Amino acid sequence: MDAFYASAEQAAKPSLRGKAVVVGGLGPRGVVATASYEARRFGVHSAMPTAQARRLAPHAAYLTPRFTLYRDVSNQVMGLLRALSPLVEPLSLDEAFVDLEAGGAAFDSASAREVGERLRADISRVTGLSGSVGLAVSKMLAKIGSERAKPDGLVLIEPGTERELLAPLPVRVLPGVGPATGDHLRRAGITTVDEIAEAGQDELVRLLGRAHGTGLYAMALALDERPVVSEREGKSVSVEDTYDLDIHDRVRVRGEVARLAERCTRRLREAGRSGRTVVLKVRRYDFSTLTRSETLRGPTDDPAVVREAAARLLEGVDTTGGVRLLGVGVSGLADYTQEDLFAQAAGERAAAEAAAEADEQATPGPAAEAVEPVAPAAPEERRWPAGHDVVHAVHGPGWVQGSGVGRVTVRFETPTSAPGRVRTFRTDDPELSLSAPLPLVEEDGGAGRG
């Protein structure tokens, strides 16, 4: 898919079509997830700090991600791919490999091109978005083809032309060549794929080690035997948060870890999985990152078990200087659970103690009348993430343009309407509420929410 998150937001918001859109974290430490092609003209790209993106493209629309919408669209696209072949290997929400031969969908270049063009038309019809297709004899070449086809195109790499195509390309185009490997090769005078092939396998093994050097040499010769694997087993489930300001309060750190553990186990259960190793990740004020893990006696998806394990791991980490990122994960995944009876008993004991404490507080003691009543805490201000869907009792559906100082600005429009009007409300307006995303294409146009 082309600039997937940003394109989905443009399709959902008529007023943003053809304009620069940046999707990602909006805080001081936020990072760009996706930039529209209009934003990329200003130099904005994925993984760039949002603060830097704002300097490059100050007039762009900056939105927080709406993963519910992206998953819906992804399910629609993956359904189209699975109709072509039983061998579909998703890489992310917006990218997948498909073995066309396994499904009998294509048997030569002409039939492959026909299938690719039909797929692009189907994606546009069903989702309202564009996707780019790379067709080749291997996964590596298909990936390169799809990148060359962007945006909204198709590239077919004919069998026998692979070496000629790869030769002038930079080494970073090959799988497994990241910034560190790329710099290492550059210092050795190797900057193109052709220069990798010319260097020879022995030289690459000397530079990068046997496994990496051998694999990279084969790919430089356009040799990639990796099959398309339909079931990609996740090795772990994890969640993490980066904080706008370093957290110094140990009590809050414990609370954040407990909250992350709850989110992690919720994702674990949604995936129908369990795991036996709990992992804690802590990035401190000086950017040093620590990971700690504890392996349980058996797989679990019990929030109490994961929460308690994460809390034990936190006790061994010094956070006095401040914490900028926390994460909790579960690895060693399985499809079944083995209840931890000790944790279950501890949870029941904690619940009983909490209930007893609540009863004690509810029962007035002898001095109860002498205690001055405490004023209730002010309600927490409602959050209105930029770009998220809302509905107003009078004005109907719209999306949040921005909020602050007790006000929220909403543009009232839908994916199938004309650009809408903007209105501002109090953040506590009872007639305004967050809502689920609307489909990008009307049902009778072929789309349905997956």
Image (cartoon, helix red, strand yellow):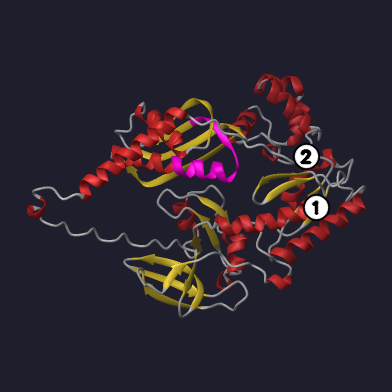
Q: Earlier in the sequence, mark 2 or mark 1?
A: 1
In the image shown, does 413 or 3 lie closer to the viewer? 413
Residue 353 percent across, percent down from the top left? 30, 38
Question: Which amino acid type corresponds to the residue marked 1 in the rendered image?
Answer: Val
Residue 190 percent across, percent down from the top left? 69, 31
Q: Can residue 289 be seen here?
A: no
Left or right side of 382 for 273: right
Quarter of the image where the N terminus is located: bottom right
Residue 443 percent across, percent down from the top left? 69, 70
Residue at 35% from the left image edge and 42% from the top image edge: 255
Residue at 62% from the left image edge and 60% from the top image edge: 37
Disc 1 designates what residue? 155
Disc 2 designates what residue? 228
In the image shown, does 167 or 155 lie closer to the viewer? 155
Left or right side of 364 for 32: right
Q: Which residues are magenta?
A: 261-278
Does residue 390 belong to the magenta stretch? no
